[in-house]
Amino acid sequence: MGQTDEFAAGAWKDRQAAGMYKAYFIGAGPGNPDLLTLQGAERLKQSALVFAPEPFETTFATMLAGKEVLIPFDFDFADLVQCIEDRLKSAPVAFLIPGDLTFYSPFQALINHLGEAAEVIPGVGIANAASARLKRTLDLPGVRNRAIIVSPRTLGNEQGMPGLEDLAGKGASLLIYMNNLPLDELCHQLRVGYQADVPIMLVHRLGLPGEEIVRGTLDTIVQTTAGRDYFNLEDPTGKPALTLVIVGETLSSEVDGSWWDYRREHIWKKRPKENG
Ligand SMILES: C[S@@+](CC[C@H](N)C(=O)[O-])C[C@H]1O[C@@H](n2cnc3c(N)ncnc32)[C@H](O)[C@@H]1O
């Protein structure tokens, strides 16, 4: 029986009776509740206490009505665990995870600690939502051949390890999360790697009020942004901005029917089973 069926069949009520509740780590997408999965919505509905990082407490306000809503980053780890464990005695607890757990999610220590009491619900990652918004696959097999997820914040300075210049290069699309470099410095490093003027987009507050997509190339984007701080670099809290940077030729590459036909012929077409 699948987990959804299990819940439909009333197992949730049994669990409630036995006092065994779970903490749900719900992939909540970029911030627009329309992108919550059905499973995520169901688990959210069951939860009495919801930990919601900004701006989810606002954008999910309708679904959070009547629930207690706390900001997870107001707690240190021990207090957070204590709060969750106390509350799990009487009802499920939910966390709304920006995007979902797949990349750059801060909740792993909590999930490890909770073990069996934690359940993770997949969601629409920021890269998925950006791809849909731009109507572009972020690699383009046979035309561009690598899509690399990276953050200058976490690359580190270890000697001999690849930096942005090494990861950028012909045929690579970079998806840059949590950028903490001034835009001119970021473009400079990328330009060294690409050795060419390639397209770049700043996807800002995707799916949220104030959404903006700023388009340019490595040589023009600084001028296009006219000094606007899309990365919260001037914010004294140093909190990463809700801006995803996408760079690479994939943003401007076009393919036509021959691309489809080639790939159909070599990969997708159903072939008769070989004998033996
Ligand atoms: C901690 S990471 C979260 C990534 C997320 N776990 C995922 O699966 O996509 C936060 C970074 O994701 C990007 N991000 C999150 N929400 C965004 C949004 N609504 N619009 C654009 N970028 C966003 C920004 O680069 C931000 O600094």
Image (cartoon, grey):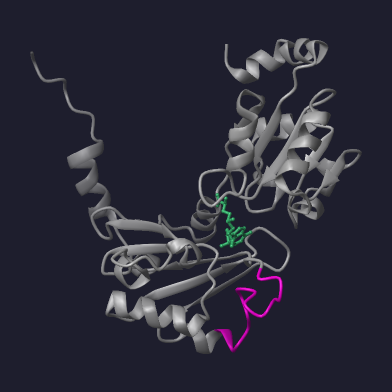
The magenta stretch spans which residues? 225-238
- Residue 175 in percent (x, y) is at 44, 61
Q: Is residue 209 left or right of residue 192?
A: right
Place residue 191 in its image quadrant.
Answer: bottom left
Q: Residue at x 74, y 49 (%)?
A: 76
Task: Work out whether residue 26 can be spotted.
Answer: yes
Furthest residue toward right: 66
Q: Residue at x 43, y 65 (%)?
A: 156
Furthest residue toward left: 276
Q: Residue at x 79, y 31 (%)?
A: 45
Judge by depth and name the residue closer to the eye, 193 or 132. Answer: 193
- Residue 176 in percent (x, y) is at 47, 64
Judge by depth and name the residue closer to the eye, 205 or 119. Answer: 119
* Ligand 1 picture quarter: bottom right
- Residue 234 in percent (x, y) is at 66, 80
- Residue 217 in percent (x, y) is at 42, 80
